[in-house]
Image (cartoon, rainbow, N blue to C red):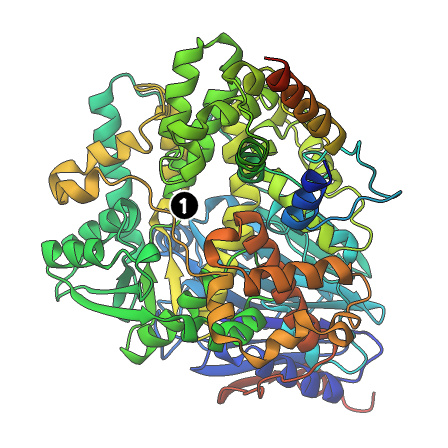
Amino acid sequence: MCGIAGILNPASPSDALGGNIRAMLAQIGHRGPDGAGYVVDDGFAMGTVRLAILDPKAGAQPFGDPSGRYWLCYNGEIYNYLELHRELEALGCRFSTNCDTEVVLNAWITWGPDCLRRFNGGFAFALYDSQTGDVFLARDRFGKRPMFYARHGGGLLFASEMKAFLALPGFAFEQDPEQLTSILGQWTPLPHQSGFRGIESLPMGQWLSFRSGALKTETYASLRFDEGPEVLTEDDALTLIRERLTRSVELRLRSDVEVGVYLSGGVDSAIVAALAKDFSTKPLSTFSVEFEDAEFDESSDQQLVSSHLGTRHCAQRITHADIADTTPAAVYHAEVPAFRSAFVPMYILSRRTKDEGIKVILSGEGADEAFLGYDLFKETLLRAEWDRLPDDVRRSRLEQLYPHLSHYGPKDIAAVTGLYHQFSQEKMPGLFSHELRFQNGQFSARLLKDAGSPFAAITDFVAAQDDYAGLSPVEKAQWLEYKTLLPGYLLSTQGERMSLAHGVENRCPFLDPDVFALATSVNLKFDDGFTEKRLLREAFRSRLPERIVDKRKFPYRAPDAAAFAAQRPGYLDLVLSETELAKLPYLNAKFAQRLATKVLTKPAGEVSTKENQTFLYLLSMSLLERAFVRREGLPQANLPPLQKVIDLTETKKSILPTGT
Amino acid sequence: MSKIRDFVEEQFLIEFDESFPESSDLFKEGVMDSFGYIQLIRFLEQEFGIKFTEEEMTGGVMVSLSQIEQTVARKVADRTES
């Protein structure tokens, strides 16, 4: 795992670019503390900060081919690199390392962008052709690893994290209300959004070329629900689930350093840990967050899994004070507005993981999206068939849907039924599954002076997708989760941005293309979907304690506004003071202040989900404005030890004939 | 009826005025969600001593302040007559 950054500016001399790229890499030094390297050429520079996982001694970057024409800065892992290595060798490629970086470079030289379809992994990379001056950027199919880019000064900037751009003279960050309204509406950025004007995220499954000033993007992998194997019986489904997940975990254990597992207390990470243990030659290390506040705590289930599997378990206890103290740093690393505080404990956990000597962890992300683990999918199934169901069935299904929410209980069920009746027909084209959730987003969008239409961007986004209209209501719900909440929050803000803040790489066995394809074949084929992830649970029933296998989904959450209300950190001035709120010109300051005052003074039981959510947006937007726009309180940038510097302008000089 | 208006303004952090009239759809504007709706029903039942039947609640949701006030006025009158 690493961080990469680059700058293409034909007007800039190479020595200035060298200084720029060192400064950009220093901004993302936390992603790769083991070493830094860069290449400069006329009008171009790019570099890597490296977290050495595979072949630590030989894989220094940027990595060049023997001819010196192609240069690669690479972030992530291709888990099937050994198979590709063999395939490329058979085609005549020669290798000097055992590192997947060299596989990626040779694959690109051999197959061009078609190589991307062959990669099973989480990656983002930049490839420079020093002969033509072309730059290519690419990103994995699920959006595991980040890649941001911006047009600047007639050229192009790119980086794993936007904070690299802070290092560039003349680059100004500005929050973009048009993107913000969309982010507040649907909870997370869309795949191309960054929240900042002029900065784009390269969407998952795409590559970008920059040739002679022209920028072009192409999609190489789209999310398809019709490419899974044919599965005839439930027994076959269970066998295939076991086989494919086992293989996925085996691939993700390829590492020259020890790999640990994050245990949430739920079934998904327990399955991952059980499979990882099968391949481990020494006791597996597992890590968890537990909460002082019992409402959020799953420590007894985490301990149960750990003792069942005999792991070396490290639990990090999280208090309200931890959340209040750490939120500004965690938001700085997340870089985008967040709708809940649950990412903050993951920042603290990755620090602990690093302190325990572990650089790579596996986690259960992606299981709920693939195997229908969220209540949202059941809710969609219910609403889609609402008009055909008798009253008593509607009622009993509703009661099963959210048993942990008091207003879904018998006392209020009539009112909830009335509400669902209103949401049984699609009102927002293509977004049926998410219409109820988007009610909260509509409330959050009130933070903006001119909220416009929070759902215009996502409506256009789905309308532009080939084949989307032909998906079933549940597949559409899954598709939306794979394009919004998963990459826009779970994998990024709560996932890799928090892990990489402390140089820990996270890998997700449920985000294997073969696992996803299988899930599309078996979902809803052998059951009605109302027992979440039933097939996955049955496939591993014999491997785990019954309590874990049959445990209902317990959404991972952390104390939200209550933590800030209890601790009252000084930075709350940002959301309470009229003077501070006025610094965000796009904000509806009156509403923002009313909201902040209410959630920070009322008892937690009187603060609704949407108010909590909106408060977190407000706080994170204010902290982002302070750090990125006003550049106040920024942490010190730190360039890891320089291991490799390639100056192609010197190389070119040395091969020029004398007298020219 | 000003009690209903006060409750909605206080609970949902809004102010009714020319830019946000009492006929605004509170769901569409993102002011009210299922949680808020239940809170509202509880408040109306307690405050006005009325009861919403299942049929009333499943048949159509009161979406604006005007609708809420009309419904409550009707139910209070029905209660008085009976």
Q: Specify the amino acid type for callout 1.
A: Gly
Q: Is residue A172 visible?
A: yes
> Percent position (x, y) of residue A386?
50, 15
- Viewport quadrant of the N terminus of chain A: bottom left
Element assignment for label 1: loop
> Percent position (x, y) of residue A230?
35, 20
Left or right of residue A195: residue A533: left
> Percent position (x, y) of residue A525?
35, 19
**Residue found at x 41% / y 59%:** A558
The answer for which chain carries disc 1 is A
Left or right of residue A363: residue A486: right
Left or right of residue A136: residue A491: left
> Percent position (x, y) of residue A30?
49, 78
Whether A89 is drawn above or below A547: the answer is below
- Viewport quadrant of the C terminus of chain A: bottom right
**Residue found at x 63% / y 14%:** B81
Q: Residues within 10 Å of mark 1 (few under 14, many from 20)?
A: many
Residue to which mark 1 is pinned: A366
**Displayed quadrant of residue A439:** top right
